[in-house]
């Protein structure tokens, strides 16, 4: 995790960066990582700038009270979200700026008219200036929205404007994996692990990718590391169990599914997969019990109905097997029903 020292060092940088992005909204990212190193001059410079502005605002409080109100609104509402209080792995987040920006808006709303005291000139200046600003901000918003078209474009953009962003690499890897670009996904997950060797999800996601390449030995090594880093997380045991199952190590797979269910008793996928493993070792009734539990937990679970139908049909229980096959098909999985129809088992 990020140490308190790093969070304290990052706080003045984040404070000034939020301020900067208010007036120049550039390089906006879905995730801002904590920097690996922060130069001392940046910390001192940001701290000094904040102090100078605060002192100046206090000195001018009687003459320009709206600046005092606006500035300290910004200071007090931005302070909890500049990274000192740990709420995640991000150094800052654009969404945290919404309420603090009201204070800066107060300063501008009362301050700009003070700069242009002539009412006639103010009318001629502020309206066209406001329109120009609105057009500029609309163009910038339209451009920024384009990065959110899909996960790949979003995380690619984030990687272009940030450094050592393991969360963005992880998100891009997941998006590429979903599109079947497994090799590229593995490269990004490897980059996640290089940047943050203690990030368990990076190992888990790379393990899932290796499974897609039928490289179960490498996958299991990654799942082992993920479990070592985060031993109480059920999905890691579930995925490792799936890899063992595909290698034919059925009892080891069952042990992992057992642990996943112990950690997460409502884990329908783990019951479904364990049912499949029990079926492969000939324990049909135990398999059916697991499918029953998966369906109880997730009544619209097409794969569980499909798998239970297969077990019933293999046992010669056509009526209940065909009933399950039809339910599975109604939920989107018609594989067993079509096969049973070809064999003349279901009509």
Image (cartoon, rainbow, N blue to C red):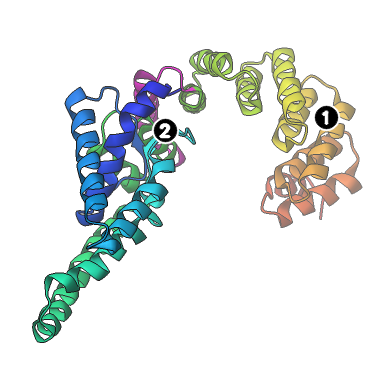
Find residue 249 and report its horizontal and vertical position in percent. Answer: 68, 13
- Nearest the camera: 303 or 139? 139
Q: Does any portion of residue 194 appear in the rendered image?
A: yes
Dominant secondary structure, magenta: helix
Q: Quadrant of the C terminus?
A: bottom right
Q: Residues within 10 Å of mark 2 (few under 14, many from 20)?
A: some
Which element type, helix, strand or loop, lies under badge 1?
helix
Q: Which residue is mark 2?
A: 84
Residue under the point 23% across and 29% down? 43
Residue plotted at (22% across, 71% down): 134
- The numbered disc on residue 287 is 1
Q: Earlier in the sequence, mark 2 or mark 1?
A: 2
Choose top left, top right, bottom left or bottom right for residue 98. bottom left
Q: Position of residue 164 (x, y in %)?
A: 29, 28
Q: CA distance from mark 2 to mark 1?
A: 50 Å
Out of 85 and 209, give the one closest to the viewer. Answer: 85
User: Which quadrant would residue 282 be assigned to in this image?
Assistant: top right
Query: Nearer the viewer's eye, disc 2 or disc 1?
Result: 2
Q: Which residues are magenta?
A: 176-199
């Amino acid at each position: 995790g990020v140490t308190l020292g790093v969070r304290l060092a990052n706080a003045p940088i984040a404070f000034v960066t939020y301020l900067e992005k208010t007036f120049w909204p550039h390089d906006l990212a879905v995730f801002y990582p904590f920097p690996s190193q922060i130069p001392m001059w940046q910390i001192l410079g940001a701290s000094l700038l904040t102090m100078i502005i605060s002192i100046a605002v206090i000195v001018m409080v009687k003459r320009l009270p709206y600046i005092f109100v606006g500035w300290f609104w910004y200071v007090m509402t931005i302070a909890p979200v500049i990274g000192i209080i740990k709420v995640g792995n991000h150094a800052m987040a654009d969404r945290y700026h919404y309420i603090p920006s009201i204070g800066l808006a107060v300063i501008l709303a009362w301050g700009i008219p003070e700069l242009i005291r002539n009412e006639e000139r103010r009318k001629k200046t502020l309206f066209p200036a406001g329109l120009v600003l609105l057009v500029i901000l609309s163009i910038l918003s339209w451009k920024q929205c384009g990065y959110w078209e899909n996960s790949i474009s979003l995380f690619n953009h984030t990687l272009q404007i940030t450094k050592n962003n393991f969360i963005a690499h992880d998100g891009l890897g997941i998006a590429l994996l979903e599109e079947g670009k497994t090799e590229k996904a593995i490269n990004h997950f490897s980059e996640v692990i290089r940047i943050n060797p203690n990030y368990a999800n990076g190992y888990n996601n790379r393990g899932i990718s290796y499974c897609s390449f039928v490289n179960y030995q490498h996958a299991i090594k990654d799942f082992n590391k993920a479990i070592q880093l985060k031993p109480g997380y059920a999905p890691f045991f579930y995925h490792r169990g799936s890899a063992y199952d595909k290698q034919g190590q059925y009892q080891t797979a069952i042990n992992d599914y057992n642990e996943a269910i112990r950690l997460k008793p409502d884990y329908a996928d783990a019951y479904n997969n364990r049912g499949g493993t029990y079926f492969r070792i000939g324990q049909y009734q135990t398999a059916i019990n697991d499918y029953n539990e998966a369906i109880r937990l997730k009544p619209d679970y097409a794969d569980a109905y499909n798998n239970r139908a297969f077990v019933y049909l293999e046992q010669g229980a056509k009526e209940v097997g065909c009933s399950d096959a039809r339910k599975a098909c109604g939920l989107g999985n018609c594989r067993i029903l079509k096969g049973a129809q070809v064999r003349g088992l279901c009509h």
